[in-house]
Amino acid sequence: MYRENFMRRAIDISRRALDEPGTEPFGCVIVRNGEIVGEGLNHSLAHFDPTSHSEVEAIRDACRRLECVDLTGCELYTSCEPCAMCVAVMEVSGISRLYYAASQGQAGEAFATLTPAERHPIDVEALRLAAGALVEDRAMPAQQEMDAQAIVVLDSWVKARKAATASAG
């Protein structure tokens, strides 16, 4: 029953928000080969950081501990179904499997009576739509500028990376 222990740990981490100011009740653990390698609690309000969700914090912790950015083979256990931002970070970092306790709908029901001043409001459906949309189809206005100058930097970085790889090999 390893999964139950890992989920219990994620929920226990979320419970810390009952006593820690500036946190929200979302906890997460990252597991590799049956061992917890990362943990996170939502600190968005305490850190004035809208990206400080428990999943992102746990992924950051795991990457630091493992000294890598590739978490392929790792499982993520979280007290609540991740938002689109967290799913994107999970994909970028290579998380191989997700286990979650409460659904986003269940969390929404639990938070329904809170005012925006009492919590950090996220429109999870709008976030999901924006994250998957092409830049020109998003509600947020966007305009591309100075792409030629940026591409020079990108191309230079690629050349330097290839040269470093060739000399190391």
Image: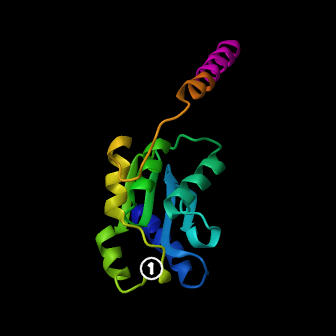
Side (left or right) of 144 relative to 98: right
- Could you say which is closer to the camera, residue 66 or residue 40? 40
Residue 82 is inside the magenta segment = no
Q: Quadrant of the N terminus?
A: bottom left
Residue located 57% across and 41% down the image: 69
Q: Quadrant of the C terminus?
A: top right
Side (left or right) of 8 relative to 62: left
Q: According to the image, what is the colour scheme of the structure?
A: rainbow
Crowding at label 1, few (<14), some or many (≥20) Cα neighbours within 10 Å? few
User: Where residue 83 appears, x then y in whole percent?
Assistant: 39, 60
Q: Main secondary structure of the magenta part?
A: helix
Q: Read off the residue under disc 1.
A: 116
Residue located 34% across and 55% down the image: 128
Amino acid type, label 1: Pro
- Could you say which is closer to the camera, residue 134 or residue 159? 134
| Magenta-colored span | 154-169
- Could you say which is closer to the camera, residue 163 or residue 67? 163
User: Where residue 61 appears, x then y in whole percent?
Assistant: 61, 55
Find residue 106 and report its image quarter: bottom left
User: Where residue 98 appears, x then y in whole percent?
Assistant: 38, 55
